[in-house]
Amino acid sequence: MSGCCGPTAVELKPSAQAVRSDDLPVAVVGAGPVGLAAAAHLAERGLDFVVLEAGEQAGASVAQWGHVRVFSPWKYNIDPAARRLLEADGWSAPDPEWLPTGTELIDDYLAPLAKLFGDRIRTGAKVSAISRLGYDRVRAAGRERAPFLIRLAGGGELHARAVVDASGTYATPNVLGASGLPAHGEADAADLVDHALPDVLGADRDRYAGKHVLVVGAGHSAATTLLALAQLDDTPITWAIRAGDAGRTYGGGEADALPARGALGTRLHAHVTSGRIRLLTGFFTHAVERDGARARVISRDPSGAEQAVTADRIVAATGYRPDHAIASELRLDLDAVLGSTRALAPLIDPNAHSCGTVPPHGADELAHPEDGYYAVGVKSYGRAPTFLLATGYEQARSVVAALAGDWEAARDVRLDLPETGVCSSSLAEAQEQRLGLATGISGGLLGSPLPLATAGASQGGGCCG
């Protein structure tokens, strides 16, 4: 109904509220590490649930960087509830000190965990919108009693008592443009641009070998790609960053609180110093011009000064951003800068925190005005690159406790973060000698440097795995 001054709130009659929220499952969006952790905690508490995964397998986004090892060993990458369920089924945990690749993370952990949940995991189920049954964002009376309405891209719909959104940010990478806007001509050169962590030594090798490659971005995803490219003969490499120097990417070297991250920066610095990688600083991507099968990338800094580089391929390791479009009919309280909840933003602000200094947080900090909706995992961090799996697992535990009505457990949040060095560069070096680089090619490259990357990091500058 419409009144003279706008919509009039009308409470639904009981017949229109025949679907009771309490009788419905909790919907988990995304079957990555944090989504499956939420499922494990829901299972332990006896709460009905369904997991909706857009890809065709559990950990579909992880599979996109399956050739890369994470910074931290297995003992920090397995959710406690998931471990208990798996071990009860006869599963044996991998070597706790081993640094897994993305593929190992799936094969040895995520896939067995998803198998336990059977048909509660629905693959190929991409969520296109979430609302309240019978309610748009404006309507208020009785809203909290209405079930969530979840619409799928294929046209199907389902109802849920609550939504745990662990859909991540991998499908929404940042643009090349330096001001947060697409560079002029960027769309026209899309076939020459790859996003973070292509398998340059394995499945994607032919696209890069012998080509001039431009890598844009200052995070650890950029560093990982640069180190892999440096192993390809006759492959010129240009690295472009906005900063005046690459100190942020190099990190603290041997003194880094995360040794594996420090090793990454040390190796990269050596390649730049030797000239193997050409570094362009103060590079603000403004335009991309097609030049046949190549692209001319033009920088224009805030003063108007320009520089340009022509390359055969471009790797945009510029990070990711959250997409809240599917929840546009829900009442969200988002920080204007990061896109996280406003309560969480000061705790994860990358201007003040690294992943190892993020304080414990859970359901209270993740709550929105829309009761029963929580974004967890990398999506909860918005544009902050300070996320790591251990944080996401604790988020999932706290949120599920809240959904179960156990607020004492929900608010007892604790984190064991790797600021004291859970990652081991000596371990990485030992694995290199034993196996070589994980390339996707049988046999690998014995003795070659080991790419390391974040586990579930939200940005190209993500912090730790």
Image (cartoon, rainbow, N blue to C red):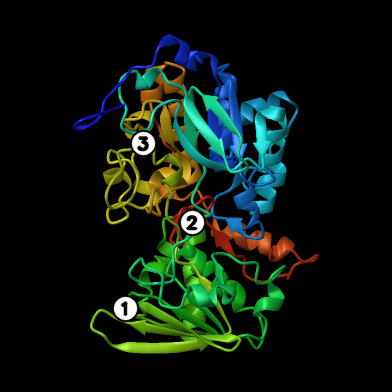
Which mark is on residue 360? Answer: 3
- Whether residue 81 is visible to the viewer of this picture, yes or no, is no
On the image, numbered disc 1 is attached to which residue?
Answer: 244
- Whether residue 279 is visible to the viewer of this picture, yes or no, is yes
On the image, numbered disc 2 is attached to which residue?
Answer: 172
Disc 1 to disc 2, C-alpha distance:
27 Å
- Three-letter amino acid code at the position of disc 1: Gly
Q: Quadrant of the N terminus?
A: top left
Observer-nearest residue: 32 or 134?
134
- Three-letter amino acid code at the position of disc 2: Thr
Observer-nearest residue: 446 or 13?
13
Which mark is on residue 11? Answer: none
How packed is label 2: few (under 14 Cα within 10 Å), some, or many (20 or more)? few
Disc 2 to disc 3, C-alpha distance:
27 Å
Position in image of residue 96 (x %, y %): 63, 42
| Labels 2 and 3: the sequence-earlier one | 2
Residue at x-position 45% and y-position 61%: 319
Residue at x-position 49% and y-position 67%: 317
Could you tell me which secondary element the residue under label 3 belongs to?
Answer: loop
Q: Badges 3 and 1: C-beta atoms under 8 Å apart?
A: no
Disc 3 to disc 1, C-alpha distance:
34 Å
